[in-house]
Image (cartoon, grey):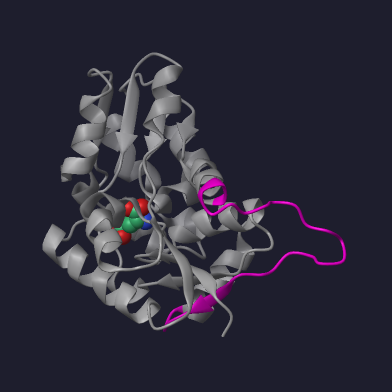
């Protein structure tokens, strides 16, 4: 097997990051692993999330890895540093795109899972924003998206956001990669633009790994491949992305 970069999430959410990575680095080999059987992670305890993330990484580390991208805010927030310390390949994480939202000014809402919002990492990030960012966890939202991924019209996005609809926010930050699948509906429900960190993650990855984003017609792009029990499911979701 040729060396590749592993992209990992609890389920389908990381596919939105994979798309940004594949667009930014079309000649890079990406292998996606989703732990769909255990998704969603966000309402679990930090210990459980760490245990699941380490189990996934141990499996991935059996392959010739160039690097790994934790395409999950929850795992990044809970244990990315521990993963970095335990494995010899570079480990990238994802961060909520709080900065660009705050720079616009006004009232900002961060939406993320419970585990992400309770983590020391994200609490430190919010502390730096000087109090203009409110945080909220729509507890059922990632699960709704995971469960209804092929029929998203059925996902109760608006119901999950109902307590926030009169919040008068100027921007919303999508601090969970699952939420990117319903970005437009979140914008509509809250009446403000939504920010996700996927392009920023891909740019950071490309710059750190020194990867050129150019492709020649002759070479073409390399399609990502999919690992694990949910490989076929995740492949179908990925290739159905607009
Ligand atoms: N997509 C993940 C995140 O970015 C995980 C959501 C979940 O499994 O609860 O947080």
Residue in the picture at 62% in, 54% down: 211
- What residue do we see at 35% from left, 68% from top? 88
Q: Nearer the viewer, residue 190 or 85?
A: 85
Q: Residue 81 is drawn in which quadrant?
A: bottom left
Ligand 1: give its quadrant: bottom left
Tell me the quadrant of the picture where the N terminus can be found: bottom right
Q: Magenta segment, principal secondary structure?
A: loop
Q: Is residue 191 visible?
A: no
Residue 226, image x, y percentages = 52, 76
Left or right: 216 with respect to 228? right
| Residue furthest to the top | 106
Look at 49% across and 51% down and name the residue there.
Answer: 181
- From which residue to which does the magenta span run? 206-230
Q: Is residue 20 above or below residue 108?
A: below
Q: Is residue 31 left or right of residue 221?
A: left
- Determine if the magenta segment contains residue 223: yes
Q: Position of residue 126 (x, y in %)?
A: 24, 29
Is 216 included in the stretch rendered in magenta?
A: yes
Residue in front for this viewpoint, 150 or 199: 199
Does residue 105 sit above or below 181 in this rendering?
above
């Amino acid at each position: 097997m040729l060396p590749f970069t592993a992209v990992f999430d609890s389920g389908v959410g990381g596919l939105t990051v994979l798309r940004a990575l594949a667009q930014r680095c079309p000649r890079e080999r990406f292998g996606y692993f989703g732990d769909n059987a255990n998704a969603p992670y966000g309402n679990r305890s930090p210990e459980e999330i760490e245990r699941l993330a380490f189990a996934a990484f141990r499996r991935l580390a059996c392959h010739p890895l160039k690097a790994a991208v934790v395409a999950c805010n929850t795992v990044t927030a809970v244990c990315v540093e521990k993963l970095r310390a335990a494995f010899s390949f570079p480990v990238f994480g994802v961060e909520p795109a709080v900065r660009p939202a705050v720079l616009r000014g006004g009232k900002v809402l961060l939406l993320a899972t419970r585990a992400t919002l309770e983590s020391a990492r994200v609490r430190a990030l919010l502390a730096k924003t000087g109090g203009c960012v409110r945080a909220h966890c729509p507890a059922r939202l990632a699960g709704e998206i995971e469960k209804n991924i092929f029929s998203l019209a059925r996902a109760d996005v608006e119901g999950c956001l109902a307590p926030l609809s009169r919040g008068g926010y100027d921007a919303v930050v999508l601090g969970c990669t699952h939420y990117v699948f319903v970005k437009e509906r979140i914008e509509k429900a809250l009446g403000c633009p939504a920010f996700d960190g996927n392009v920023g993650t891909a740019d950071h990855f490309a710059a750190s790994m020194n990867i050129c984003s150019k492709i020649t017609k002759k070479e073409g792009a390399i399609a990502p491949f999919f690992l694990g029990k949910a490989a076929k499911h995740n492949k179908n979701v990925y290739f159905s992305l607009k």
